[in-house]
Image (cartoon, rainbow, N blue to C red):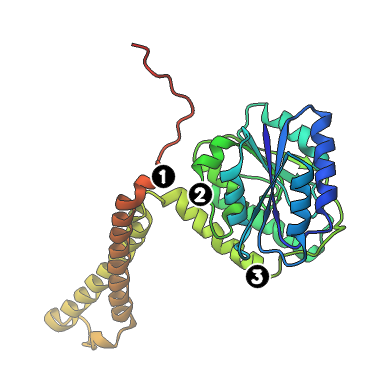
Amino acid sequence: MLSIIVPVLNEAESLRELLAQVARSCAGCNQLFELLFVDDGSTDGSWKVIQDLATAHPEVGAIRFRRNFGKAAALTAGMRAARGDLILMMDADLQDDPAEIPAFLRKLNDGFDVINGWKERRFDPWHKVYPSKVFNGLVGWMTGLWLHDHNCGLKLFRTEVAQEIRLYGELHRFIPVLAHARGFKVGELAIKHRPRKYGISKYGVRRFMRGFLDLLTVKFLTGFGQSPQHMLGAFGLGCFAFGLLGLGWLSFLWVLMNVIGVMDPAPIGSRPLLFYSLGALLLGAQAISLGLLAELIVANTGREQDTFSVREQVSPRG
């Protein structure tokens, strides 16, 4: 069964049409589905519409938050409630066409674990399109997973992926990256993007700033989440080495000036290198200390999530 998770925030106008299009698309490919609406603190009557749909259609489920907690929280709640073998996340504004569902299912059956949508032709204003291109390039460069559109709201993945990744903040856009870091096979599919018909965009300029900060978080989690000292310690050792070299050079100059007398004496304390070296030593010591504290935290909390991902397992029969 396919579990379709739709976060909802003031989308009352589009919900009935969304259900009709999803049902038509799944019926065309004989796909059993459930549609889970997660009301993320709507104030426009969306919950009333969802209740009516859930009453009239047995395949519709509903979750309602007490207030707005964000898209990642809505998706997490939906994934916990999902009963299907496959999970499709989809926005409620109908800019992504539900008619793409059969193509996503076929693509996943080619041996992939995650299929990420790619809005090949976007109907968004330029000030969203071009920063998005830059952002996607940064994600590919920093994570090694090159996709055209990491921000696309249409993603299909297996339940094993949902069981092994943890979403919080705004990490929902990095589901393919988090899955790729766990060893899952990620693909993408060009989809039809439609002009906005209902609602207004929930994203502003701050989205790109938060996206970059989230990218740094994902890079750290996927690269050093289980060994933070490898990053913090390496940085600390580099600073420490710079500080020691600087102090060593100043000591050598002091010997030349005051013991051998080769150079005219000049106060070491007036040289900028002294302050740079001392600052580097302090910064290096702090970074190494933070790395050790992070390692202690990982050692005591790392049991909450395995550091490996099992693809298959055969139990002994004897």
Front disc: 1 or 3: 1
Instruction: Give the amino acid type for the residue marked by disc 3 in the picture.
Output: Arg
Q: Residue at x 16, y 82 (%)?
A: 261
Q: CA distance from mark 1 to mark 3?
A: 31 Å
Instruction: Give the amino acid type for the residue marked by disc 2 in the picture.
Output: Arg
Residue 176 in sight from this viewpoint: no
> At which x and y percent is residue 50?
75, 53
Mark 3 residue element: helix
Residue 35 in sight from this viewpoint: yes
Q: Residue at x 61, y 41 (%)?
A: 82
Decide which of tag 2 and tag 3 comes sooner along the chain.
2
Q: Residue at x 31, y 55 (%)?
A: 295
Badge 2, how many Cα within 10 Å: few under 14, some, many 20+? some
Q: Which mark is residue 206?
A: 3
State the count of labels: 3
Of residues 12 and 231, the one nearer the viewer is 12
Mark 1 residue element: loop
Quarter residue 81 falls in:
top right
Task: Answer whether labels 1 and 2 touch (C-beta < 8 Å).
Answer: yes
Q: Which mark is residue 166?
A: 2
Decide which of tag 1 and tag 3 comes sooner along the chain.
3
Q: CA distance from mark 1 to mark 2?
A: 9 Å
